[in-house]
Every structure is written in structure tokens, then in C-alpha cells.
């Protein structure tokens, strides 16, 4: 089995591996600067016309359900808020980084984005639910959920043969894909996510769930948001919001579930809310992929 170090350099040598466009980092900085205003973000975003047009489509869609028409980016920032605009910019950019080019019989890209967006929504609901005792940022939780499996799409695009070997193994032996990757390749999509995003300047709260959502016990920091993402991913499998039903669900880490202190009533409330809200996942994905 090839050592992880060797694989890491294999990944880093992929010269066309996507980097996060500067606009995303600029928006992130502005949003995190308490002295910034709506017009600062609108000015930066307004430089990219294609992105601006998509932001307006999403801001006016049923996903956000704003009762009046949003006609400008400035308007969108004022109505939706800086953090939501940050989420939209990051989401749309990441969808764009991995365009749906090749059709793969083994990996369904549409199902992948629907799983990711469902996980994002569940992360946001859980974050809102737990606001009382943990200072979760619901938008940060959404982004963590959206990006949690990003390593898979990188593998599909740049490490195609490896990924398909793992996918076949997972389907044949009905084991979780994460396990199949480790068994057949010696690395997993979580390692790829770490290598991919190490140069992306993402806040740790966003990067660590991508790396540890399958083994939250190993997260050295941000245990809460890692547990949240792990549990949201688990719920996606429970609710059949998966990429592929041919391989099995990753196991639940009970300590993570306990950390969230969700009551059976919380889970019931969540399931009820999700059945209505998840319809909006398709709206989000259709605009982001379009
Ligand atoms: Fe995963
Ligand atoms: Fe997942």
C-alpha cells in the first residue's frame, strides 16, 4: 500500500487542482470584519457579473423564500445579511469549481450535490436548535455540511481510477465508502479534502469537519462542529438522502451524538421540519449547477 505522504504529493502535483478564487477569500475577510458594510461586499461581488447574476437568482428563489424581489447585490446583502451572502458566494463557487463534465456510471454527481446540500441544511437546523448552549454559527454549519464530502468529487475528477476501485469495493462488499477507500487505497476522501483545502485559507471550523466527519473522535479542535457534521451525515443516511444506496452507511459515533445532547423530541421536530424543507434542496442545486 502506498504511504500517505506519497499520496499527498501525488495530490499536490495535480497542477490544475482547483484553488479557491480570490473573490471568496475577499468576501470571507469582509464578512468577518465587524467594521464592514453591505456596500463593501456588494462592491467585491459586483466585479463578477456571472456570479452576481447567480446570486440574485438564488436570493430570489424559494430556497430563501424572500417575499419581495431582490433587484441588486446591495439589496441582497441588506435583506439576507452578510453571512448568508458569504455562504452563497462560497457555495456557488465550489459548485463551479467542479463542473458536471463526465458522466460516470459509478458516481452520480447530481446525487452527490443533493446529499451535500441536504447535509448542509441539516447542519444548519441542528446549529439553530443548539444555539442555546453552544455558540454555533448556523451559516458556518451550512457551509461545513455542503463541503463535507468535497474530497469525493476531487477523487472522481482527479483520481478517477483510485476512486472507482474504492466505489466498486464498497458496492461489492456493502461497506461504507470511507472504509473501502482506506482498505483499497490507503487514504480516504477526508484526506483528499485536507490536501485540497490546505491552501484555501478556510477557517478551521470549516476545514475540520471535512477532515474528521467520519472519525470525529480524532478531531483535535472544533469538536462541536465536527460532531454536528458527523451526525448530520448520519441523518442523511437514515433519511435516505445518500449518494448511492449500494454501499452501507458509515457508523454512528455515539460520543458525537451525545455531545449534541439532542432529545428524541428534537429529532422528531427535525424530521418533521426536514420533510418540508428538503424540497428546497433541488432549487438550490439546480441554480448552483446551472
Ligand atoms: Fe464523507
Ligand atoms: Fe456524506
Image: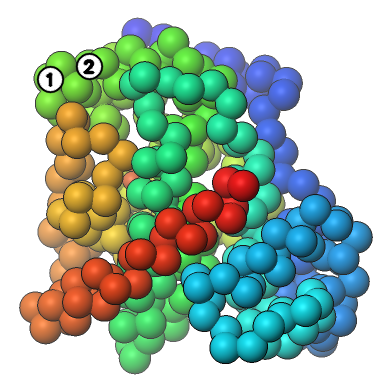
Relative to 155, residue 60 above or below: below
Residue occupying the point 58% across, 55% down: 287
Residue 196 screen position, x and y as percent = 59, 36
Residue that carries the numbered disc 1 in the rendered image:
173
> Badge 2, how many Cα within 10 Å: few under 14, some, many 20+?
many
Judged left or right of residue 60, residue 277 is left
Between 207 and 112, which is closer to the camera in this rendering? 112
Relative to 77, residue 240 above or below: above
Residue 17 lies in what quarter of the image? top right
Residue occupying the point 64% across, 23% down: 12
Image quarter hosting the N terminus: top left
Judged left or right of residue 144, residue 128 is left
Residue occupying the point 34% across, 21% down: 106
Residue occupying the point 62% across, 66% down: 58
**Rendering colour mode:** rainbow
Give yes or no for contact between labels 1 and 2 (Cβ–Cβ under 8 Å): yes
Residue 29 screen position, x and y as percent = 76, 68
Determine whether the residue tagged by mark 2 lies in a helix, strand or loop: helix
Residue 11 screen position, x and y as percent = 58, 22
**Spatial separation of the CA atoms under disc 1 and disc 2:** 6 Å
Relative to 60, residue 107 above or below: above
Relative to 281, residue 177 above or below: above
Residue extending furthest left? 264
Residue that carries the numbered disc 2 in the rendered image:
169
Between 256 and 123, which is closer to the camera in this rendering? 123
Judged left or right of residue 238, residue 135 is right
Determine whether the residue tagged by mark 1 lies in a helix, strand or loop: helix
Q: Is residue 99 visible?
A: yes
Residue 229 screen position, x and y as percent = 35, 59
Residue 133 lies in what quarter of the image? bottom left
Q: Is residue 77 visible?
A: no
Q: How many marks?
A: 2
Amino acid at each position: 500500500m502506498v504511504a500517505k505522504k506519497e499520496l499527498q504529493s501525488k495530490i499536490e502535483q495535480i497542477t490544475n487542482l482547483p484553488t479557491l478564487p480570490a473573490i471568496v477569500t475577499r468576501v470571507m475577510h469582509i464578512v468577518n470584519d465587524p467594521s464592514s458594510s453591505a456596500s463593501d461586499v456588494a462592491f467585491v461581488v459586483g466585479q463578477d457579473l456571472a456570479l452576481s447574476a447567480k446570486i440574485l437568482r438564488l436570493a430570489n428563489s424559494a430556497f430563501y423564500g424572500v417575499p419581495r424581489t431582490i433587484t441588486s447585490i446591495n439589496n441582497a446583502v441588506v435583506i439576507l445579511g452578510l453571512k448568508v451572502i458569504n455562504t452563497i458566494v462560497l457555495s456557488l463557487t465550489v459548485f463551479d469549481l467542479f463542473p458536471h463534465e463526465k458522466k460516470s456510471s459509478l458516481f452520480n454527481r447530481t446525487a452527490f450535490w443533493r446529499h451535500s446540500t441536504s447535509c448542509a441544511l441539516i447542519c444548519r437546523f441542528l446549529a439553530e436548535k443548539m444555539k442555546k448552549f453552544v455558540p454555533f454559527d448556523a451559516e458556518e454549519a451550512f457551509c461545513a455540511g455542503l463541503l463535507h464530502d468535497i474530497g469525493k468529487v476531487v477523487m472522481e475528477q482527479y483520481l478517477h481510477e483510485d476512486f472507482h476501485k474504492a466505489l466498486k469495493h464498497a458496492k461489492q462488499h456493502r461497506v461504507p465508502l470511507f472504509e473501502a477507500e482506506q482498505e483499497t487505497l490507503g487514504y480516504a476522501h477526508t484526506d483528499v479534502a485536507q490536501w485540497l483545502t490546505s491552501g484555501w485559507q478556510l477557517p478551521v471550523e470549516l476545514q475540520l469537519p471535512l477532515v474528521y466527519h467520519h472519525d470525529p473522535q480524532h478531531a483535535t479542535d472544533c469538536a462541536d462542529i465536527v460532531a454536528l457534521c458527523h451526525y448530520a451525515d448520519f441523518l442523511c443516511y437514515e433519511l435516505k438522502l445518500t449518494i448511492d444506496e449500494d454501499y452501507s452507511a458509515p457508523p454512528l459515533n455515539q460520543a458525537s451524538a451525545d455531545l449534541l445532547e439532542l432529545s428524541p423530541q428534537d429529532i422528531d421536530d427535525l424530521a418533521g421540519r426536514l420533510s418540508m424543507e428538503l424540497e428546497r434542496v433541488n432549487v438550490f442545486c439546480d441554480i448552483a449547477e446551472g
